Image: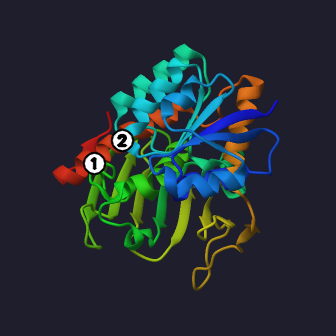
Amino acid sequence: MTVRAAIVGLGRWGRALVNAVHGKSDDIRFVAAHTRTRASAEDFCRDKGIALRDSYAQILADPTIDAVVLATPHSRHAEQVLQATATGKHIHVEKPLTLDRPSAEAVVAAAKKAGIVLAVGFNRRFHPSIVEMRKSLAAGRLGDVISIVAQHTTSTGQFIAPDNWRAQPDEAPGGAITAVGVHSIDHMIEFGGPVRDVLSVTRRVIPGPSDDTTTIMFRFESGATGLMFCSVATATTFSFTLFGSKGLAEISLPNLQRFRFVPTSDTAPVGPVTAPPDQIVEFPAFDMLNAELVEFGRCIAEKRPYPVSIDQVLHGMAVFDAVVRSGKSQKIELVG
């Protein structure tokens, strides 16, 4: 079965999603599209053989379309997902699912009632480096989680026009978390468990309407701690390090290419402290967008839930809310 999908939103990211599977997958194929800026998308859709529709309502009314992929402004996700569930369309929505926990709960409830596949675009969960960390933790190689430290930055902020929707404060609460930070929050929840409270500091580096840089401290219910720095105002990098009682695992480079494991020493140091040799695995080429969309198509065909846990997505929305509150109050905020 090839899932026939519609892409809604054809900006930079929407086009990247289309390109990730166009001519590359028998599991999912984009057959229709809708965007607010039709004129700028006509050539792209013509080249891809995608029917460009005048409205979202036309997409939802088409019985030949099985699924909708939303690459639209964050503030529109809740309404658009609810509209899609009402027509029985399966839904893949870019992160964040919505902009607060209550609306996310309403969306999840509607999807469950409709019996459709609801997928949230945490594409990094599919990367082999993340899979390697997941396996290492499950196998006990890392021991108990002590702390998690993440950095995720890009230089995209300087290229976003002040009137672009991504630059608006209502679309980007909490500084850089909607653009990049939610990925690291998602990984922290998967590997560290539920978050108890957070302390967040945001600032504005590039002139514009929204903060673009965020630093967050986390305390987990397990007793572990976390620290995250994310920004869209500096050079591009990514690193995610899990410190465990038996060793550390680190994922690094912007494409998550390098996985490094360092075990704890098994002998007392004599002289200068040294670490055991690194164990490094490289994954130089992996298409995360292709992986998430192909899996979405397969989940629809096989009638099974998407593998990104909805319970963890909802907890992530509660953490999101607490981070936004903390950025405003400058105080530690409990995760609801």
**Who's the residue at 62% across and 38% down the image?**
6
Give the residue furthest to the top: 113
In the depicted structure, whether residue 208 falls above or below residue 69: below
Percent across and percent down for residue 202 are: 27, 61
Left or right relative to 306: residue 151 = left
Percent across and percent down for residue 283 are: 75, 65
Q: Nearer the viewer, residue 7 or 320?
A: 7
Left or right relative to 57: residue 159 = left
Q: Quadrant of residue 119?
A: top right
Mark yes or no: residue 132 visible: no
The amino acid on which the numbered mark 2 sits, given as a three-letter code, is Ser
Residue assigned mark 2: 75
Q: Quadrant of the N terminus?
A: top right
Q: Nearer the viewer, residue 210 or 159?
A: 159
Q: Nearer the viewer, residue 274 or 182?
A: 182
Q: Which mark is residue 279?
A: none
* Mark sitting earlier along the chain (1/2): 2
Label 1 and label 2: CA atoms lie apart by: 8 Å
Q: Are marks 1 and 2 in contact (CB under 8 Å)?
A: yes
The amino acid on which the numbered mark 1 sits, given as a three-letter code, is Asp
**Who's the residue at 24% across and 45% down the image?**
325
Crowd rating for badge 1 (residues with CA inside 10 Å; few <14, some 14–19, many 20+): some
Q: Secondary structure at mark 2?
A: helix
Mark yes or no: residue 72 visible: yes
Residue assigned mark 1: 170
Percent across and percent down for residue 15 are: 60, 55
Q: Secondary structure at mark 1?
A: loop
Crowd rating for badge 2 (residues with CA inside 10 Å; few <14, some 14–19, many 20+): some
**Who's the residue at 66% across and 29% down the image?**
65
Q: Quadrant of the C terminus?
A: top left
Give the residue furthest to the bottom: 271
